[in-house]
Amino acid sequence: MNKPNVLVPDATDQLPSLQAPSGVPTPKTTEVMVILTAKQGVTRQQIMNLMPAEIRATVKLYLDGKIRQWYSKGDGRGVVFFLDVKTVDEAHAIMQTTPLSKENLTNHEYIPVGPLLPLGLLIGGGPTQQVIETHTQSGGFR
């Protein structure tokens, strides 16, 4: 089984880290975004041969409430799913049931997402206020 690819910022990123320091609350994962793209060397014909079965499988996942939203990538080279799961492992298990994944034709990028922490300021802070103050003091959110 392929290990899921979880988006982790590169050490050379110029953007400040939005990861909370240890001991500070982090966003609750409410969904996992999955980006699917064809593996290098996979032909359009290989994808199209499985497309009817892939469509049926993804529609079933949608009707079962596992896929909340789905989109085509803007460049037309893949799809983006938002899965109703709380962990990358759960998302990986779901995606491995699809025909394109079973045939090992696609790459998957898994990104846990959740509520935007600064929105907590609108309702009186709490743990969100602590995260924002910590990030501001450490040079984040500027």
Image (cartoon, grey):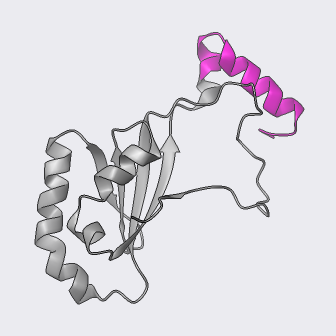
Q: Residue visible at 15% across and 63% down?
A: 55
Rendered image quadrant of residue 20: top right
Give the tally of numbered discs. Answer: 0
**Any magenta on residue 103?**
no
Q: Residue visible at 41% across and 55% down?
A: 34
Seen from this angle, which residue lies furthest front?
Answer: 1
Rendered image quadrant of residue 10: bottom right
Image quarter hosting the N terminus: bottom left
Q: x, y (%) of residue 62? A: 19, 46
Q: Is residue 100 above or below residue 10?
A: below
**Any magenta on residue 140?**
yes
Q: x, y (%) of residue 127? A: 67, 17
Q: Residue visible at 61% across and 19% down?
A: 120
For the magenta stretch, what is the residue range?
120-142
Q: Residue visible at 30% across and 59% down?
A: 96
What is the chief secondary structure element of the magenta stretch?
helix
Give the camera-side residue of 88 and 63: 88
Q: Is residue 27 above or below residue 34?
A: above
Q: x, y (%) of residue 6? A: 54, 55
In the image, is 112 to the left or to the right of 61? right
In the image, is 26 to the left or to the right of 32? right
In the image, is 34 to the left or to the right of 104? right
Image quarter hosting the C terminus: top right
Q: x, y (%) of residue 5? A: 51, 60
Give the camera-side residue of 69 and 20: 20
Q: Is residue 111 above or below residue 43?
A: above
Rendered image quadrant of residue 102: bottom left
Give the camera-side residue of 74 and 8: 8
